[in-house]
Amino acid sequence: MGEASHDSKLDGMGPAGGNNKVYIGTFVHSRTREALELLHDTGVFVDAAGTIVAVEPDCHAAKARDVVCPRLGWDGAALEVEILTARPGQFFFPGFIDTHVHASQYPNVGIFGKSTLLDWLNTYTFPLESSLKQLDKARRVYTACVRRTLAHGTTTSAYYATIDVEATNLLADICLSLGQRAFVGRVCMDHAEMCPEYYRDESPEASLAATRSCIDHVRKVDPDYALISPIITPRFAPSCTSESMHALGALHRETGLPIQTHVSENESEVALVTRLFPDSSSYTGVYDDHGLLTPRTVLAHAVHLTEEEADLVAARGAKISHCPASNSALTSGAARVRWMWERGIDVGLGTDMSGGHSPSILEAARLATLVSRHVAMPLPDGPQRERAKLTADEALFLATRGGARVLGLEDRIGAFEVGMQWDAQLVGLGDVREGEDGRDGEDGGWGTGVLGGDAGNVDVFGWETWEERIAKWLFNGDDRNTKKVWVKGRLVHERR
Amino acid sequence: MGEASHDSKLDGMGPAGGNNKVYIGTFVHSRTREALELLHDTGVFVDAAGTIVAVEPDCHAAKARDVVCPRLGWDGAALEVEILTARPGQFFFPGFIDTHVHASQYPNVGIFGKSTLLDWLNTYTFPLESSLKQLDKARRVYTACVRRTLAHGTTTSAYYATIDVEATNLLADICLSLGQRAFVGRVCMDHAEMCPEYYRDESPEASLAATRSCIDHVRKVDPDYALISPIITPRFAPSCTSESMHALGALHRETGLPIQTHVSENESEVALVTRLFPDSSSYTGVYDDHGLLTPRTVLAHAVHLTEEEADLVAARGAKISHCPASNSALTSGAARVRWMWERGIDVGLGTDMSGGHSPSILEAARLATLVSRHVAMPLPDGPQRERAKLTADEALFLATRGGARVLGLEDRIGAFEVGMQWDAQLVGLGDVREGEDGRDGEDGGWGTGVLGGDAGNVDVFGWETWEERIAKWLFNGDDRNTKKVWVKGRLVHERR
């Protein structure tokens, strides 16, 4: 299982650039929100900059080498071409996009007791985040988080770091070094009553200055934001003063940088915002009143939005990150994805570690389908119930193209199209094979190696359709099925 | 990680019996429904029959050999003693108990589309189950299911097979051969209007005769039901005639064998039962009216039970198998575990493959905590909301001792106590280690090997309490963390 065959030399783990590459096999991506597209026997041609320059049907290695490469001008002696052909049953899938994740909370995954949002922050979250001002600790935590999420096929993450400038810059450096596309946000939180004394910005000015400092750092290490982008990150309305939110809104207008924050996660939080910002029409309205509700804004959760708030989000073109694991674990509620879609809002998925327990966007997609069924449950039978449920195809759209739209990257990532970048994963499933003599394999029908370390939990018996294999991957797949991961053409993870 | 050290020779995979054994390390099990107990530096002494004969605190290998073994009379030359000491950070945990699983549906895990119970049965389930009358296919499917669930630490399963006698007997044989403790039920379904013509028992008499045939088979291969027990299995009320249910009730009274069926999974199903059995007071009442509601009865789901039905279940001492994955996937509802407990009903967990997608009872426990929070969501804030939520400890109780009670095995399995049998798993978590020189390991703090094939997804940084490590295991653990599995003293699975 697992290893794809290489017609020429192996991809090396290493910096972007280098040779032109051809990937051959089955490609699966979202054609529309409703439907995956399966491209069999296809060649995807990726140039040295990591950009897809051709998608060729009916393509095998010989045709790639003898017909397509010459057409692309790739037959000069100076350019070496590497060809990777997926094994039968394997497929290429777009890299996953995590639109909401707190890298700084990674060590706390699974640890939340019976808490809900506001006590969870004080009990588990703020102490850990604060401790990452120790850079050695931050390095361990961030490296673990980035490597772990890469291993799960996450090629792009929108990260919250902490309030600490140096530690936030370290996260940007680690993403750049390990090759994960990332938005890296220094967390702004300056509300003296709402934030603990040991973990808050000293003033709106300090909050703004620290944010600028982190932007400067990214500009220095990745001047074109080719892989890493800063993101303006007011934690959430209750933790910010009106002054600091106005300043961050102005910073957005000045720089055009994206914004991320939380909205309407929990009913107590909504009540708190109403109390803290009596002049705003709603929780969403608070961000709008501070110039923070824009087409570049990513709002996490949005569980308890009113109709008016949804209309406001849609009117401003702001996006929503749906975080089903976290919303269930913290008893926040069941967010209504189709309801958001029907109001014209783009939605992606977030792991929301450590409110969410899992580093995997595949698990987020799985839980999105389950939570959508909990949304359906209180309603009477009929079309409305049917409508709330997300299909496997829709969940995988959320995990890829949906996330790309949320982060403003829909022209660059999320699918296999000419002009997009090669952010991709190679997926392989377990194969319950029969023996070569036509009888069942050893031990009565269980192929050798299926219980080996790396085959994972998806058992393919051979009679499944491709659609069923993909559903099996969605529901029982894990990082063992993600054999290789590339970002912008660079191989950034490989199972050995 | 992974390998525990052996003071003497390695355990061999093989039939039960052989040497006395001593297991040394940390043992974790449910002391009560509310609280796990952690026994550090403990020795558990297991005799050649697989029975725990001593649990010794402050025990290391030398003490085991020099003090405890002589006390047990294990120092004779004729008896060899093997000692297995868990590595630091590893722990022994009781084997998981799956109180509701359709082995015959295993190939369909993850495949359910947007269906709900009644259309799911006709679209996905009956065709697959029917096809297992081909014994070659049944062998592949059942072997895959038993090996896969063993690999996830499931030491006991309550299986539904199919209506086919030979295939059902084959499942019993496979469980016996691979060493999984199991209840194996031939599925009874003889209602001509409700079951498809291609997949039903011909008559109540045929249904009873086939059931007796399967009981005879188990009695032949495992005369004392030491590992395998038959279980009387009317599929669910809508698929059975009143005659066949009366006959199966009589069979229970004659044999004392346990019973398993489904109850109140889905609202349409409840309405159907009301229509089909107008003389019974309720869905639960149907079983009671046919002598099928007894202390040995396992009722799967029980999502929509009324107060009166819960009282009837409690009065009869019947048990409930909670199947959260399935209930979410099929939009059945969110079962109220604490509500059942408060009414005096014993509850265990079921994977309910393939209504449920996962072979893992650890995932069932994880989903039980999440679903319990969905139960809490519609309620106003306050103690009631708090009460519905299950803790990590409670979920792991459901997975072990709770399941043992449901299957009437509470004196034999589910914990580490003298007189119980050694049905256990050795659990190891990933370790994000620092380098030996005190600086972080290579790649900035990520210990070598953590992303290797078998370490799994639980990253332990070293500062976690034991309780937090266990919560991390519950939420991100998988079969990679289950290093070894024993049933009745026999090593039945080992990760290599």
Image (spheres, coloured by chain):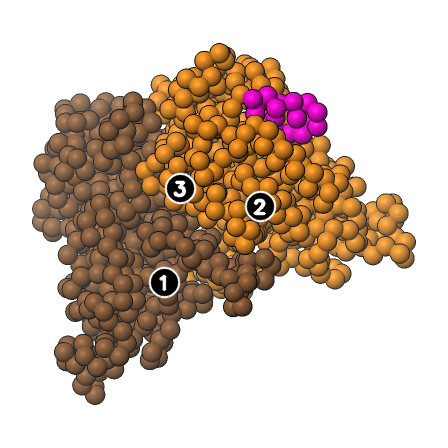
Chain colours: A brown, B orange
User: Residue B426 or B132: which is nearer the viewer?
Assistant: B132
Crowd band around label 3 with a 10 angstrom C-alpha radius: few (<14), some (14–19), many (20+): some
* The C terminus of chain A sits in image quarter: bottom left
Badge 2 sits on which subunit?
B
Amino acid marked by disc 2: Ala
State the CA–CA distance, disc 1 to disc 3. 25 Å
Residue under the image location 62 percent in, 50 percent down: B174
Residue under the image location 21 percent in, 74 percent down: A48
Q: Is B116 within the magenta?
A: no
State the CA–CA distance, disc 3 to disc 2. 19 Å
Where residue A5 appears, as percent x and y from the top left, is 37, 73
Residue under the image location 35 percent in, 18 percent down: B380
Instruction: Please tell me whether residue A372 is drawn above or below residue A350 in the rendered image.
Output: above
Q: Nearer the viewer, mark 1 or mark 3?
A: 3
* The N terminus of chain A sits in image quarter: bottom left
Q: Which residue is mark 1?
A: A90
Where residue A347 appears, as percent x and y from the top left, is 22, 42
Residue under the image location 23 percent in, 48 percent down: A35
* Picture quadrant of residue B231: top right
Q: Is residue B472 left or right of residue B150?
A: left
Where residue A88 appears, as percent x and y from the top left, is 37, 66
Q: Which residue is mark 2?
A: B167
Q: Secondary structure at mark 2?
A: helix
Q: Which residue is mark 3?
A: B124
Q: Nearer the viewer, mark 3 or mark 2?
A: 2
Tell me the magenta residue range: B243-260
State the CA–CA distance, disc 2 to disc 1. 32 Å
> From this viewpoint, is residue A418 visible?
yes
Amino acid marked by disc 1: Gln
Q: Secondary structure at mark 3?
A: helix
